[in-house]
Image: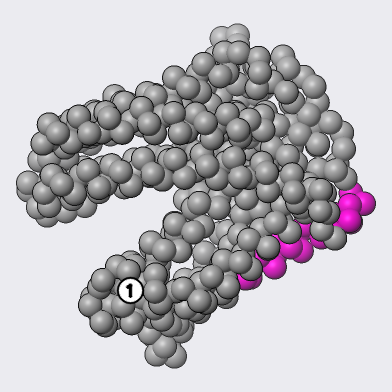
Amino acid sequence: MSGSRPHPLDREILRLAVPTLAALVAEPLFLIVDTALVGHLGSGPLAGLGIASVILQTAVGLLVFLAYATTPAVARRLGAGDERGAVRAGIDGIWLALGVGALLLIGGLIGARAAVEAFGAREDVSAAASTYLEISIWGLPAMLLVLAATGLMRGLQDTRTPLLIVGVGFAANAVLNAVFIYGLGWGIAGSALGTVLAQWGMALWFLARVVRAARAAGAALRPGFAGVTVAAASGGWLLVRTVSLRAALLATVVAGSALGVTQLAALNVALAVFSLLAFVLDALAIAGQAMIGHSLGAGDRARVRLVERRLVRFGLLAGVAIGLVIAALSPVLGYVFTDDAAVREALIPIALVMAVGVPLAGYVFVLDGVLIGAGDGRYLAFAGIIALLTYLPLLWMGAASGDLLGLWVAFGLGYIGARALTLGLRVRGEAWLR
């Protein structure tokens, strides 16, 4: 890099990452719109929406591997000059998504009510949650299809199409929900139906783009058993990785619940802030998936190493910038989330520790994307388990201190540090450069 002129790879990273960031931010807005509209129906429907959303988000969150496994598989074949094989790999991922979605739908039809009742909420809340969930599960196959098709588009180095489709889907969701909830008076059922229709609209739009790409590349649309099996195997390792991440977050919340209501409330705010900053870092990671897969497919190891270094630089710089913002806002951050003075006070030192740890998180998120792009899912699965097992005793010591600060140090520095070590050691070697 000479002077202040940006490296050509920096422009490519931003070309992929910026639309990805916008699409990632648009996705949680679905839930925000639902919450805002349903909230005016009363506390019962709002609480019911919360229960149903947790169940749905858990299911979809665990299956994000449908996108993460598809992106590098497509990018690798594209980099090798095999456009037909690239599109074919994405189509196999879509068939896998439809199969998993069908199983989820069947499971949801059988167990939706039991899943809601497991929360032990009062009768009106459970009724609202069951109503929302029993309608929403019809959108699960569509959402999984969207995940897989998004992975295909990203693998083809196209992050603008997912942004366009998700953006229009978000707008349609807001309009449909408003009409169904208030215009037709269908209440929380209208909210669920509006979201399902928006989800299937996005899925069909994605399918149309996939069909167009398949015809242009001369790729068959029928399922290929071998390809679907490979996609399932790759996705299985990434599922283990995702489960380890979810387990760490769940363990953190469980430990925080033992510290009292004020500390738990502050922890929930801290996790919400951490999730928000994760969108920026995830956008870089997803750009890494596409670029690393493409470069490895082309057999250009020198470019792979250069992409990795530029991505790490971006991750660290983004982490420092976000950390400075969080540190500057730490005295007033709590006012955005709560009127409780005790919670706001408890949040200040947590925000400062978070600010220190964000650059480390940027390093972790980027390397996670690099290794996913390299198809190194097996290592990521074992590394996730090792990081989780390392974190649990640290979490126990943090919780034993009786203070939320110790708990957050265990998570924000201990757990993230364990992930940084396992991922950093891997990229220093050559085994992942396959």
The answer, for residue 159, to whether it is visible in the render is no
- Which residue is pictured at 63% across the width and 61% down the height? 100
Q: Nearer the viewer, residue 378 or 155?
A: 378
- Quadrant into which the C terminus falls: top right
Rendering coords of residue 400 (x, y %):
14, 33
Q: Is residue 218 rendered magenta in the image?
A: yes
Residue 379 place in picture, x, y as percent: 58, 29
Where residue 194 appears, x then y in whole percent?
50, 77
Q: Say which amino acid is labelled 1.
A: Glu
Query: Does residue 146 belong to the magenta stretch?
Result: no
Q: Position of residue 354 (x, y in %)?
A: 28, 31
**On screen, residue 319 above or below 3:** below
Task: Report the side of 390 relative to 202 (left or right).
Answer: left
- Local crowd at mark 1 within 10 Å, few (<14), some, or many (≥20)? some
Which is nearer the eye, 117 or 303?
Answer: 117
**Left or right, residue 314 beside residue 77:** left
Q: Nearer the viewer, residue 383 or 338?
A: 383
Determine whether the residue tagged by mark 1 lies in a helix, strand or loop: helix
Q: Which residue is mark 1?
A: 117
Q: Is residue 353 above or below residue 174?
A: above
The quarter holding residue 355 reads: top left
Name which residue lies at 66% across and 58% down: 97
At x 41% / y 63%, what residue is drawn? 55
Residue range in magenta is: 198-221
